[in-house]
Image (cartoon, rainbow, N blue to C red):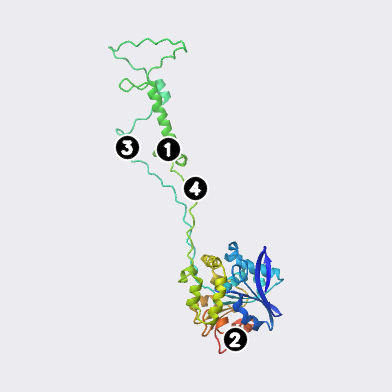
Amino acid sequence: MSAITIDNELVHYEVLGRGRPVILLHGWLGSWRYWVPAMQHLSMKYRVYALDLWGFGDSARNPSRYDFAAQVELVTEFMGRLGIVKAALVGHDLGAAIAAHLAVKHADRVPRLLTVCPPLFELPERPPDPAPAEAPTLAAPADVPPSAAPAEAPTLAAAAEAPPPTAPADAPPPAAPVASTASPPAPETPPLLPADGETSLQAALEQTARAIGEARLAAAPAKLALNGAAPAPPAADAPAASPPADSAPTPPAPRPNPLKAHLATHDRLELLKQHIEAGPDQDKLRVEVEKADPLAFTASLDAFAVVDTLRDLRALTMPAVLVYGDKDSLFPAPAERMLAALTDGRGTFGVMSLAGTRHFPMLEDGAAFSRLLMAFLEAPDVTKIAQKDLWVRRVR
């Protein structure tokens, strides 16, 4: 058993052989162990590494490292710590997605790439974020007949110029002011805007104050709303209210996750039972599946709301091959339009279907798969790997 530490966390790996480096990346239902037959075959000419991703096999369990970006960075740091400048990458399902993403980010470090049963989906475009809702514009009130129009509040200037009211002839004389020892009497002010002869200056002032307050409410409804007060209806010529400057933006709509929607269940052992034929291979895989942290599985599934392996494969510039089992029920054969998008006009991308295999061709037909790996690493042109009886080549 070999291991290194990255940021004080243990990363387990195994290595065989000498020669140019090849790195094997496992998938969701397993660990480095299912690469053993391929490692033994390739070690005759290559130095072959197989590592456990975060949360799988014997590598550290730390949920903060389970997201997709952290797994990609793990492989990059692994290469740096072991002094691997360049390496061919071979990845299976999750490992294939990681390898493809790393090859796009660091094309100079990946001379060629082979992906086995990768999760390929046509990721829908993210719906545009909703535009901020505009404040409703309140229509000006309909024209009001002059007879129905409310009387305007008096102003102090108008009140000062208003003539004093004429007292009725039979009105009693005004009472003499009562002298006060505290302060001299205030000068008498004539009443303003009488209503039936009873409106006083105090009433006029209160009416004026109310009018001023209503005008201020109409001019600043948003500020009052923030303070918990109900804004008054704006006047006919008042500007439309705008939303508060510090209001929280509308959160973006969540992306759909085609991978999670594709899987009928997210239980790892149930997936193993449904898609891997019962027998010694399933028994070996079950041990590794039970050893892995369930959170590492679910966190990597969540990432495929934004991870688009089909897009990454289309962006590759180095020689690459896509391999899938023709009887795979977990990730069935890619649709023809996907294959066309990957291969049309590209002389460096090959597609191969392994006859009679399901999701784990490296276990189901280890000899044929190992020969395919060797041919992939040796062929000058990966799109012209010689057709063998044990596999069917599909190159467009």
For the N terminus, the image quarter is bottom right
Measure how far apart labels 2 and 4 are at the Cα level: 63 Å
Which label's residue is closer to the chain start, 4 or 1? 1
Amino acid at circle 4: Ser
Mark 3 Cα shell of 10 Å, populated few (<14), some (14-19), many (≥20): few
Callout 3 secondary element: loop
Measure how far apart labels 3 and 4 are at the Cα level: 36 Å
For the C terminus, the image quarter is bottom right
Callout 4 secondary element: loop
Amino acid at circle 1: Ala
Measure how far apart labels 2 and 3 are at the Cα level: 93 Å
Name the residue carrying label 2: 367
Q: Position of residue 271 (x, y in %)?
A: 49, 74
Name the residue carrying label 4: 247
Does 20 sit left or right of 364 as displayed? right
Callout 2 secondary element: helix
Q: Quadrant of residue 221?
A: top left
Callout 1 secondary element: helix
Q: Position of residue 322 (x, y in %)?
A: 56, 78
Name the residue carrying label 3: 144
Circles 3 and 4, Cβ within 8 Å, touching? The answer is no
Q: Is any part of residue 348 visible from this angle? A: no
Mark 2 Cα shell of 10 Å, populated few (<14), some (14-19), many (≥20): some
Taking depth in this image into account, of 273 and 229 the one nearest to the observer is: 273
